[in-house]
Amino acid sequence: MKSDPRVIIVGAGFAGLQAAQSLANSGAEVILIDRHNYHTFIPLLYQVATAQLAPDQIAVPIRTLLRRASNLKFLQAEVQQVDCIAQELTTDQTTFSYDYLVLATGSKSKFFGVSGAAEYAFQLKTLNQAISLRNHLLTCFEEADRESDPVRRSQLLSIVIVGGGATGVELAGSLLELFTGSLKRDFPHLNWSEVNLRLVQSSDRLFTEFPDSLGKYTAKKLRSLGIKVMLGSRVSQVFEHGLDLSDGTYLAAATVIWAVGVQGEVPLGLPFPAVGKQQQISVSPTLQLSDYPQVFAIGDLAHIPSHQESLSGVAPEALQQGVYVAKAIKNLIQGKTNKPFSYFNKGRLAIIGCYSGVGQIAGIKLRGFLPWLFWLVIHVVYVPDWRNRGLIFLTWLHNYLIGDRPVRLIFPSSPAILPRGRSPDQLS
Amino acid sequence: MKSDPRVIIVGAGFAGLQAAQSLANSGAEVILIDRHNYHTFIPLLYQVATAQLAPDQIAVPIRTLLRRASNLKFLQAEVQQVDCIAQELTTDQTTFSYDYLVLATGSKSKFFGVSGAAEYAFQLKTLNQAISLRNHLLTCFEEADRESDPVRRSQLLSIVIVGGGATGVELAGSLLELFTGSLKRDFPHLNWSEVNLRLVQSSDRLFTEFPDSLGKYTAKKLRSLGIKVMLGSRVSQVFEHGLDLSDGTYLAAATVIWAVGVQGEVPLGLPFPAVGKQQQISVSPTLQLSDYPQVFAIGDLAHIPSHQESLSGVAPEALQQGVYVAKAIKNLIQGKTNKPFSYFNKGRLAIIGCYSGVGQIAGIKLRGFLPWLFWLVIHVVYVPDWRNRGLIFLTWLHNYLIGDRPVRLIFPSSPAILPRGRSPDQLS
């Protein structure tokens, strides 16, 4: 008897997880590999960084999500080598042969050669990074509260966000909500005119993926909230306590957040190079590698040169590719051929915060309260677990009713988590 | 004009936090110092370690709890030196003079000279330790799931809890709930007869603080759940993957949890020694140091030789001492004298898990479902914040209705939290 075909999926982000779930009860043996044992709901990372949501509310154990079908297996491992000719994948745990391989390892930050950015700027691509940023921000306020030197205090209370896309704008609005709703009550003795929140954008408008009028609306809204929006400003160097702009201006800031630029997180040991400025893997219209049709690449990692519109790395694209690739593999197993992947764009929304958002759905431009509310509803619906959905909904209700952000924990303190039960205090 | 008297409280556990809150609007300037910016609700730590509650659900930002009164201030700092003659306290941040000093630094684990215990056994005194234990347990199951060597697999699936008091029993029951409710569904291919949960107790019964019959009931209940209760067994050495008993028996176990023994967490730089086997600070009937009446010690740190019954380090004792010391300081400020502290024992409850508990209230012995339910109700009521109370209640409801434990996150992976936004993956 011939054994079931084996599908290995690397990466349990939106694309990889969706591919695995769509292969439930397909007759294939599916092994989903990730370095973490949980799926991260990336679009809400910025709310973890700003003490609104708790980390566990946007993280779901992968095994929970695979319980629905016995053909879906999970392995927590790091990929070390892909041998496309022998059809073998080597991880730090074991080596597998595969019939089909789906690469869905996502993206990471890109620094455009800006010196110091990788070392000193905070990023927002993983849950660990979101918590690092939250801990750092809260520590800066604690330090500022007991700092008598006004120069150092103003540096501690200055934040620069680099990038005026969705992440940068969301962070700016959310930080402002944190300051006005919670931190002003926590630190009644701080001089709030010293708090300085800047958003630096290299092009001359925000939200370049939206029509011009929505970008202008966003800039106006952020400025009315007290955020300094610096358009046409390019960062040339990042330091531990500030950054240089290319026009020579130095901005002092204890917190610099890098919210611009992504590139493919290419798995180790691939026998072919990633291509282009985005360092992605080029795939055919059916999301396969042209030389190795058993190998698919989906999500942020994949670039489809033939696609009618260029994809922008949002969750719906990854989810649709996950569904597509599962269908495509089922077709191939049954000896059928596949039609090219085609992305159905349902529209796009972005949140500014403070009850404002922007969006474009079926060509109609939206701004203000309605896209803000839509954004929240859509995101709570897309969270892949009922418990998380419920907790996020309740947390938002609580936040927006009373204005407070309760997850203001400097925790774990770095590097708090040691392999064994000892705390760093006990080691000293 | 004479300035307000200054009260410094070191430690924001049950005793210190309660003392600060009871001094709200007292006319004194109150500075509460803790090394963390949050209060930990210690009695529920074991539920964080067993993936039932999320860490933020039992941690409350201290500033939230001090917002009620403008005379209450918070400082995140480490104490370095106490000068009782000059009435000065030095921290890593700044030096304060004080009119009254309240030491409430709590307790830490005590290892009775057992070699290897501090290095290899997990503890359960802090939130970091609870998360370390959770991560380790879940990692052991992930490893066991892919381990083909039966000896190593059985070691990974073996857990020994040292100590048959409240913490040990609670942990044993809660681990069992985790295994049967969640992990059996997560790991359908594991051979569950290889899972081995042992509770090692040096004396000949569990729960020595309760009447004999309740200890016997507890042992019987745990055994009926499949936990090996080893009475009269003393640990002589702990290794990375097991432990030796004093009768020469070796127990292989990837997880050893130290749930016995506490001693005072004495602040650094005290000008007098801690005393006794428990390394506590001896105080007068009014909880003051006899040589330095401006200095109080309360909670687990304090030993009251004159007290009619010996205190056992539970939260109600700490809370009552916190209330007492606030009243005592207010009296001293007004030139009044204080009556001795007297603990009012409302009774005692302990939870076994799986819908069972034991207790003794007003001399009446309780066992089974009722003390289990009382325990949950009392603990949810005592959590010092409405948000946390609500989340814990909902989590328990969810857990006990569907049996699942959703916080099964191996997160942050050690040592994941770096000072800046980089993850360890990116450093390699």
Image (spheres, coloured by chain):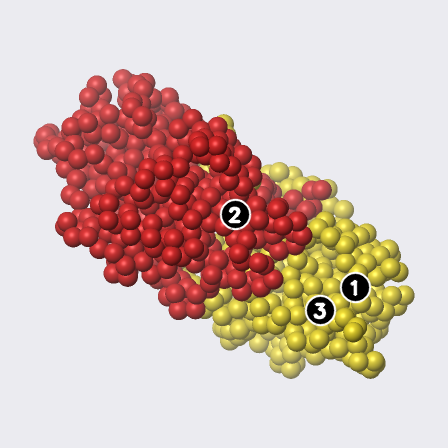
Chain colours: A red, B yellow
Q: Chain of mark 1?
A: B
Q: Is residue B79 above or below residue A92?
A: below
Q: Quadrant of residue B330?
A: bottom right
Kind of element beneath mark 1: loop
* Residue A359 screen position, x and y as percent: 24, 52
Q: Which mark is residue A158?
A: 2
Kind of element beneath mark 2: strand
Please name whichever residue, A34 or B143, is drawn nearer the observer in this view of the structure. A34
Give neighbour class at mark 2: few <14, some 14-19, many 20+ (Cα, 10 Å). many
* Residue B255 screen position, x and y as percent: 57, 45
- Which residue sits at x=53%, y=56%? A193
Give neighbour class at mark 1: few <14, some 14-19, many 20+ (Cα, 10 Å). many
Please name whichever residue, A184 or A301, is drawn nearer the observer in this view of the structure. A184
Q: Dividing the image into 4 quarters, which one contains the N terminus of chain B?
A: bottom right
Q: Chain of mark 2?
A: A
Instruction: Name the residue that disc number 3 marks.
Output: B29
Report the mark closest to the observer, 2 or 3.
Answer: 2
Q: Which mark is residue B98?
A: 1
Q: How many marks?
A: 3
**Looking at numbered disc 2 in the image, what kind of residue is underneath it?**
Ser
